[in-house]
Amino acid sequence: MVAHLVVALAYDQLCTFEFGCVVEVFGLARPELDVAWYRFAVCSAERGPLRAAGGVTVTAAHSLRMLDRADTIIIPGWPEAAAPPPALLRKLRAAARRGARICSICSGVFVLAAAGLLDGKTATTHWRYARALAERYPAIDVRFDELYVDQGPIVTSAGSAAGLDMMLHLVRRDHGARIANLVAQRLVIPPHRVGDQAQFAPRVVRDDEAGRLSKLMDWVRSRPADRHTLGSLARRSAMSTRTLQRQFYESTRMSPIAWLVRERVAIAKELLERGRLAIAEVAERAGFRSEESFRRHFRRVVGVSPSTYKRQFARQ
C-alpha cells in the first residue's frame, strides 16, 4: 500500500515556525512506530530561494503540480495582505473536488478562504486574524476562540502551536490514539487538546494554583478507574469545589467532570487499539460504571461506537 502523501506549501515570507512544525510531524521518518508513515513533499508557486522568517531561505523541490498527487495539503501560514496566486487557488479547488484533505495553520486560512473552500463552513485562525477573516469573508462561520476546527476534508487551526494540536489530531484520525500519543511524546507536548479548547486563558493562573491543578490531572490519569467526584477532586487538590471548577474552565474550557470523561475515553481508545479486551472490560478499566454509560460517552466524544472503533484501529 502506498503511504499517504502530505504536501506542505512554501512561499515567499514563509512562516518558519509553522512550516517547521509540519516538517517535524510529517517529514521525519519514524520507523519505531511500525506503521505505514507518511510520505512528505514541499511545493511552491515560485521559483528560487524563498525568504522565511528569521533570515532563513527555503528552496522547494516541487512545483504546484505536486498538489495534484497530495492526499493531505497543509498551508503553514500566509502573509495576510498578500493575494494568493490564481494558479494556487485553482490547484486547491481541484484537490478539494477529488477529495484531498486540505488544512491551514494560522493565517494560512486566508488562502483557503480565497479559494472559496470555506464558504458555508466553520473555521478558525489565530485570534489576531479572526475578525479580519470574518469581515472579509462573511460566508464563513469564524470561531474566534478555538484551537482547531475539523470539517472533514477541510481542517483549520489557530496560531503556531495550535497547528501541532491539529496535526496530532490528523495523525490520530489516520493511525489512532496510540500512535498519536507516541508522536506527542517525541515532541514533548500534550498528546491531545480538543479543538474547541480556548486559544488562551482569559485570566492568569497563579503558579501555586496551576501546580496543584497539574498534579491533580496527573494523579487522576494514573487511577482512572477510581470513583472520582467533584468533591473528591476538590479535596485532593486542596481547593474549594468552586475554585476547582473555575481553574478547570480557565485551563481547559471544560468542567472537571467533562475533562474526566474525555480522559477516560482517551484511555479506552488506547485499550481498544490493543485489541485484546472485551468492550465491558475496557469500560471497567477506563473508569466507566456501566457498559451503557461507556458506549454513550464514547460515541459522543469520538463519533463512533467502541465496537466500530475497535474494528477500525485494533492491532491484529
Image (cartoon, helix red, strand yellow):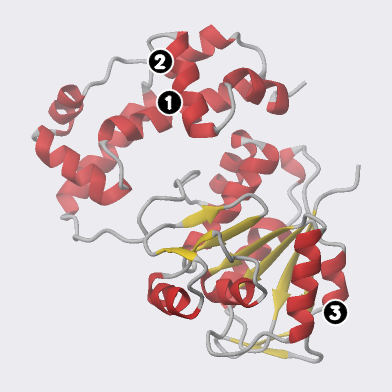
Q: Residues within 10 Å of mark 3 (few under 14, many from 20)?
A: some
The residue beneath circle 3 is 63
Circle 3 SS class: loop
Compared to residue 66, the image places residue 40 above or below, namely: above
Q: Position of residue 55 (x, y in %)?
A: 59, 91
User: CB atoms at circles 1 and 2 under 8 Å apart?
Assistant: yes
Image quarter (top left, top right, bottom left or bottom right) of the C terminus = top right
Give the numbered dot on residue 30: none
Q: Is residue 171 visible?
A: yes
- Residue depicted at x 61% and y 88%: 13
- Residue depicted at x 78% and y 89%: 46
The residue beneath circle 2 is 288
When asked about the image quadrant of residue 227, the answer is top left
Compared to residue 284, the image places residue 235 above or below, namely: below
Q: Amino acid at mark 3?
A: Ser
Image quarter (top left, top right, bottom left or bottom right) of the N terminus = top right
Alpha carbon separation for disc pair 3 and 1: 45 Å
The residue beneath circle 1 is 264
From the viewer's perspective, tell me whether residue 213 is left or right of residue 62.
left
